[in-house]
Amino acid sequence: MKARPQQTSMEPELNDLRQRLQEAEDTLAAIRSGEVDALVVNGPTQQQIYTLKSTDYTYRMLIESMSEGALTLSPAGTILYSNARFGEIISLALEKVIGSSFQALVHATDQPKFESFLRQIEQPAKLELRLIADDNKTIEVILSANKINFGEDEPVISCIVTDLTQLNTAKDEFISLASHQLRTPATAVKQYISMLLDGYLGELSANQREALIKAYDSNERELTVINDLLKIAQVDAGKVRLRLAPTDLHALIQDVIHDFRDKIILKEIKLELNASQDKFKIMLDPVMIRTVLENLIDNAIKYSPNQTAITIQLKKTKLAIAVRIIDQGLGISPQDKLKLFKKFSRVENALSIKEGGSGMGLYWAKKVVNLHGGTISAEPNLPRGTVFTIKLPAGETL
Amino acid sequence: MKRILVVEDEQLLREAYGYVLEASGYDVVLAADGEAATKALQDKQPDLILLDLLMPNVDGVEFLKQADIRRKLPDTIVIVFSNLSMSNKVDEAIRLGARKHITKSDLSPKQVVEEVGALLK
């Protein structure tokens, strides 16, 4: 039988082992809870550092590999953290992004709305903004933000930045291509139905004619939508160029009204054109401005009940020529007013559903008027109806 | 009999215009692109050319340049088919001798015949 070692001589060794075991257990617990980022291990010749994938590694990777920009901002708008994608969006090295002011990146015109957004944010909210990239390009983005509170510590604003520029370009290209491909067959349908209706291919019975007129009208609606889509794609791509010519705006409005005479008579609408005694000959693109006037007058007629009045006023001031189209129709609610001139927006009411429409007419009108250096707006016509106002720079009267 | 050259790559449209123009008493020659149109010019000079601008191979503007319409056929009236996206091409076509531009999807074949008739008066 072996003699047991004496307890007194073993005690220091056991205590040392107990201590090392406790340390090892504490280290393991710290690693499990993510408190340890790296381990220093004594090697035979030197110390070696092992970094650990911390427990939030997966979250970090998610944020870093996102196709959207991700930021945290201080309540004052200082960028506390940015992922690499945001740096790419604004063409700026990440080390220059972090610590800088987000507001400094915002387009001057959008700064007031960004300031107010930042001040008021309490829950998830979105804001469309234009940023100025380091190469001076304007980048349209959507900022989705939320305020995160940390008890007594200062809150932070978490932001996701979606670059709309690439998205819009791809969408515009798709619309343009799709519209071209759709327009040719629709034009052929129009031509052949027209040939039948115009009697080139023989006499038609009343029923045949009626059926063909329905097919023709339906195809015309399709062509209108396709043409509108194409026009919008062109204007958004900056490919619409004005062909300015000296034009008498008064005569142009009279001409457009003349084209609507059948619709006006059908709805027994009293349409008046009131022009001051000024000269209204200015430089404008008559084809483009005609489409704007047609759109506004057509809308006024469509949304006016029978036997009401539409007044078109034409006035000149020193700087601008104003065209006001005043109807007694359904009017526009304040919330609809905000989206009126946006792309594909349609005001929903019983009449708009019946009348149809692509939601592109007013967006197009705004773009065309803006290209002329003018403005377009809509206000209620109390007690009933809407006033659309176009203001074009008067320039030199020709 | 007045002669009209229709230059249009879309067969259905080419035939539609050809049909109504012939029915209206014109001598019609059809061409599917600028190259075929240039060949057609060697035969007999047209009084009017209906010219699509967007075509494969030789497009409308290229045809006007190659055929040198403005100089070689000063009496021939050229109408080009256009749309909004082609304002640059329209301007160039006008510089090269086109008299008028119309949008295909706006006009029925009968209206095209009326346009042609008005210009050939």
Image: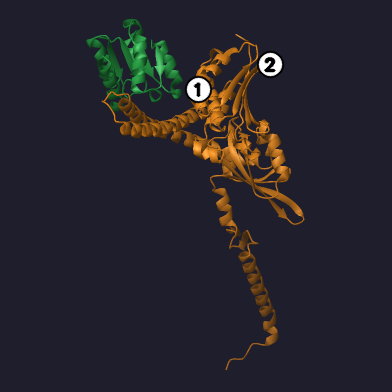
Chain colours: A orange, B green
Which residue is labeled 1 in the image?
A: A261
Where residue B90 appears, x then y in whole percent? 42, 17
Q: Is mark 2 on a helix, strand or loop?
A: loop
Up/down of B103 relative to A386, above or below: above
Specify the subunit that label 1 lies on: A
Depth check: give the residue in front, A324 or B50: A324
Depth check: give the residue in front, B101 or A163: B101
Q: Is mark 1 on a helix, strand or loop?
A: helix
What residue is at 75 percent from the left and 54 percent from the top?
A: A153
Q: Is residue A84 left or right of residue A220?
A: right
Up/down of A258 relative to A67, above or below: above
What residue is at 56 percent from the left and 44 percent from the top?
A: A68
Q: Distance between the residues labelled 2 and 1?
A: 30 Å
Judged from this view, the residue extending furthest toward the bottom is A1
Visible residue check, residue A83? yes
Specify the subunit that label 2 lies on: A
Depth check: give the residue in front, A256 or B62: A256
Which residue is labeled 2 in the image?
A: A317
Q: Tell me which amino acid carries mark 2.
A: Thr
